[in-house]
Image (tube, grey):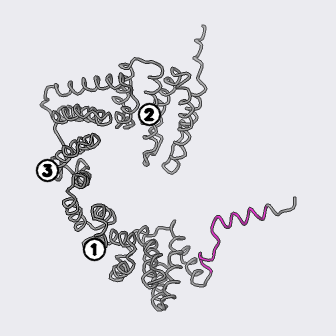
Amino acid sequence: MTQKRRRAVDPVEREIEAALAPGRFIPDRISFTFVSELEGVAATIAKLISIEPARAVGLYESFLAGCYEKAEEVDDSSGSFGQFANELFCDLIKARQAAGTDPETTASRVLSFMDHDPYGFSRGVETAAAKVLDKAGVAAFEKQVRARLDAAAAAQPQSDEPHRSQADYARRHWGEVLLNLYLTRNNLAAYVALSEKTGLTAKDCHAIATMLVARRKLGEALAWVERGIGYDTNRACVDLVGHDLAGLRRTLLSKLGRGGEALESAWAVYRTRPSQYTYDDLMKFVPKVERPVWHEKAMDAIEAGDLRSTIELLLATKEMERLAERVRRCQDNVLQDLSHYVTEPAAKQLEKIHPDLAARLWRAQGMRIVDAKKSKYYEAALSNFGNAMRCFERAGLTDEWAKTVNDVRTRHHRKSGFMSEFEKLLAGSGPSNRPSFLERAKARWGSRETEVP
């Protein structure tokens, strides 16, 4: 019996398969490297679009199929693999258009991937696709999505809850796909018509306002912003645009010559939530000559803010004495609850002018690590304790450092690995005197270069 001749495999397909590493699980810690290798293969295919577009189409479809097959073997907590697969959709569209493929067929193919997508790789692909589709492609895609939306809207209500929920989801999903398409293509009239038909939301009001701003119709844009803000607060929060609407409103008020109202709005927000972000937003609307006065006013209102936001704001505005006062009033356990992203910059800034406070901040960072038993960060804890010891000694608070040492020895004596290094630190041979990893590596490499062959 004559065996069927196997189809010749494109060499790039072999690269795709090798890069996808079938059968090998990809943990999140190496997902960036894994995706980088995939991007290298995708770049090879991209070069074929202008010279062999039909071949590129086949390779992109094979690549997408491979990504779906690989999905169960990837910990994509970072989302990089999903983002890569999403971008492949756009590359596929570019290749199909270069190959002169019928736009209706291209739209059908993209929608087919969206229909059979258990991993969400195609989520939001309509936004990216709208940027690369040509005029005929947009029309074909819109036509087919519209047909799906109309079919979902015309579906007879089901008596049982699962079927009714499924029908509601289809209407919301295809409506959102179409709205995203209109927004990306800046089709204001179509967006307004569809959003009012499917049920206007605060998110829609923001989208419409941004399109009007692009057309320099600031008064109309403000009216839509006010309409969006008028929605129920919880609904605006669900749409994740409540603060965007408020920010856009202030910008529009300022551009329309109503700067006083914009400033009043920004001040109200700042007083409720003092932070570096709300401070910067406030100062955007303060006349230049009045900024010193408003700065003092803002500093007087920081008590309403949480500790983390307050420290970040005081650091950003270089208000060191106010920072020192705020830290001085805090209990040690409160400082210990703060992330090192907050306490470390504060400690560094306070070392010269208030070493006693810097010492407390360094100590809080060290205690936070050892109390939480985060053994992989013990080296950082030792560094923090070394800084604390130095600052306590500079401030003349040797008794306070002695209490810290006694506390660590009493509560953490069972952490033998940590305590041995801690005792070396006290003896003056701790991590602060130890060369860094790169220093040790360079020293070792230099000794090799001086060896006589």
Badge nearest the viewer, 3 or 1: 1
Label 2 amino acid?
Tyr
Label 3 amino acid?
Gly
Whole-Å distance between the Cαs marked 1 and 2?
Answer: 59 Å
Which residue is drawn at the image coordinates 34% and 76% (left, top)?
334
Label 1 amino acid?
Val
Between 310 and 189, the one nearer to me in the picture: 189
Quadrant in which the C terminus appears: bottom right
Rendering coords of residue 73 (x, y %): 48, 40
Whole-Å distance between the Cαs marked 3 and 1?
Answer: 33 Å
Query: What label sits on residue 218 in the rendered view?
Result: none
First to last magenta residue range: 429-448
Magenta-highlighted stretch: main secondary structure? helix
Residue 25 falls left or right of residue 220: right
> For mark 3, what is the residue?
230
Between 218 and 143, the one nearer to me in the picture: 218
The image quarter in which residue 102 lies: top left
Residue 446 is one of the magenta-drawn residues: yes
- For this orientation, the residue located farthest to the right is 453
Residue 22 falls left or right of residue 115: right
Residue 126 is one of the magenta-drawn residues: no
Regarding mark 3 in the picture, which secondary structure is present there? loop
Which residue is drawn at the image coordinates 35% and 30% (left, top)?
114
Regarding mark 2 in the picture, which secondary structure is present there? helix
Regarding mark 1 in the picture, which secondary structure is present there? helix
Contact between labelled residues 3 and 2, with CB atoms less than 8 Å apart: no
Rendering coords of residue 285 (x, y %): 27, 61
Query: What label sits on residue 68 in the rendered view?
Result: 2
Asked if residue 227 is positioned above or below residue 346 in the image, the reply reads above
Badge nearest the viewer, 2 or 3: 3
> For mark 1, what is the residue?
293
Whole-Å distance between the Cαs marked 2 and 3?
Answer: 43 Å
